[in-house]
Amino acid sequence: MENNRNFFITIALSVLILSLWQYFYVLPHSEAQREAARIEEQRLAEQKKAAQGTSPDSSGTPVPQQGAIPSAPNAPATDGTTPAGREQALASTKRVRIDTPSLEGSINLTGARLDDLKLKHYTLTVDKNSPEIELLNPAALPTGYYAEIGFVGSDKTGTVPGPETVWTVDGNATLTPATPVTLSFTNDKGLTFKRTFSVDSDYMFTVSDTVQNSGSAAVTLSNYGRVTRFDKPAVASIYVLHEGLIGVTGTEGLQEHKYAAVEEDKQFTPGKSTDGWLGITDKYWAVTLVPTEKQPFQPRYAYFEDGRPRYQADFLTDPITVAAGQSATVETEIFAGAKEVAKVNAYAEDRNIRLFDRLIDWGWFIWITKPMFYLIDTLYKFFGNFGVAILATTVVVKALFFPLANKSYASMANMKKVQPKMLEIREKYADDKMKQQQAMMELYKTEKINPLAGCWPVALQIPVFFALYKVLYITIEMRHAPFFGWIQDLAAPDPTSIFNLFGLIPIALPDMLMIGVWPLIMGVTMFLQMRMNPTPPDPTQAMIFTWMPVVFTFMMAGFPAGLVIYWAWNNLLSIIQQGVIMKRQGAKIELWDNLVALFRKKPSPAE
């Protein structure tokens, strides 16, 4: 049947590329991510044993040239050594404690850097005893990652705050949403710098710098900010997700530079801007700078190889003049935390940060991925379970496409009725394909049948499928979201496998054999849905008809469990819908006959 052939081709082409990419690219990356998480947990456990180590050596930091952002601290370190653990690195410098409902950590008084930050609500794995996510780390560690604000001066300004400046705490020494922290530094030229850190209850810091000129002459200096990272994620990002340097500035708008790109090109320097943001993003976390004074600044995305290789997103403002006896204030906001959709959107709107919602990689099809997320999230708030929300989303999608699906299934039912006439035409014009096609088109016109109608429900499911995949993969709300039973993370594949009897046999299996319960359910529902239609007379199509559910079961096994659950539930609803419509149209439902024929013993040629 033409309809069956079109149906097969539409499904195969829509999913085959994504499935092969998932199997050969995503699955190895997922395995590497799990291994990286295991190693990280082991590292953190070892740190708790108070391993001994050396203190960081920062004496090798070069003196910045006028008009240039200073080099990163400990890059290079003079003796090439780093502390043995995170706790030793933190203990080697004086610090101001950070304690908010979402964050804990400290500010390094050397450089006044944010280089110690943990996320209270997020852990490495679903294990309840898993350590918290360490977002920022001291520069002396191999995993060094920090945000820093400073100044670039000249001979007239004297020493200005930079990476090696040791600040003094004025009063309160714990940063909370209710208690800002003020630091101060005075140089030999009569300039006093007052830096106030404040933070909200989520992930946004505000750094306000006031420069008081007590000298006898005006001075000119520039403000800089940078996010610097000495390592990169243990597992490279996949095509559907951007990880690396990111920002929105000037007329260029959104800029995304993967780690490999900046390693190759060294620097990307867009035009100057007076608004926007820039930083470094991971799959679920990000650290960004938001200059807020509308002072023109030069953004830059760079990779440096001097000393320790490092990635850096930074900005440098145009010179600011402070007259004698006067003061000037500059302010920078620093986002450091989880990319929660509601909070990122609120920052974009409340603080008027241009396109800050693009910090979450919604992709080119943002017009469908965002609504898909909001639908699932709204249903989650109602049901309290993201898995149930996905099931409800499927029902909503089916309801939206119900009129079109009705027409499609009705057309399919009508095609079943005229199948004998179609066979007659094929036999009559077996040697003349042109006349055969003309006769078929005349038949379709007479019977008012659209031969492509059966493809529309599948074709319309393709963007829904991709949107759901994107939402499950990129949004932190889906991370570690449980369903029921053994599914404790809807963003990860089903952890069970039929090949070890779903855990009864204690053996480790390669990813290709991890065929869990939900992929099997999906395969069965796909098999039943396809058996609702007559078996194609063509042997090749019949073989595809038989083996496609098996192939898809293996391919879909590595997809996020939430996506497989969606596909299986969608198949079941389609079976019910198609059965009801076919019954109303008076078309025979082939399911039972096809199942009987499949398992019936075929006669031998001798018989």
Image (spheres, rainbow, N blue to C red):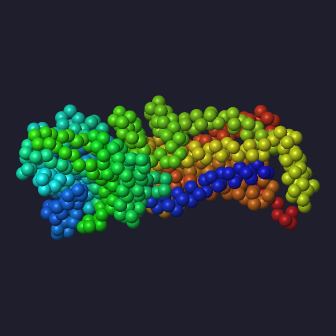
Q: Residue at x 14, y 42 (%)?
A: 323
Q: Point out residue 450 in the picture as x, y percentages from the top left corner.
A: 78, 43
- Residue pictured at 54% horizontal, 54% vertical: 557
Q: Which of the 4 quarters of the picture holds residue 482?
A: top left
- Residue under the image location 21 percent in, 66 percent down: 76
Q: Residue furthest bottom?
A: 79
Residue depicted at 30% across the width and 61% down the height: 310
Q: Is residue 469 found left or right of 169 in the rendered image?
A: right
Q: Residue furthest top?
A: 382
Q: How many marks?
A: 0
Q: Is residue 174 visible?
A: no
> 468 or 211, which lies in front?
211
Q: Residue furthest right?
A: 428
Residue 537 visible from this viewpoint: yes
Give percent across and percent down for residue 18. 56, 55
The x, y position of residue 183, in whole percent, is 13, 43
Placement of the C terminus among the 4 image quadrants: bottom right
Q: Tell me if residue 171 comes above or below residue 526 in the rendering.
A: above
Q: Is 568 on the left-hand or right-hand side of 139?
A: right
Give whichever of 128, 9 is nearer the camera. Answer: 9
In the rendering, at what x and y percent does residue 352 appear?
36, 36
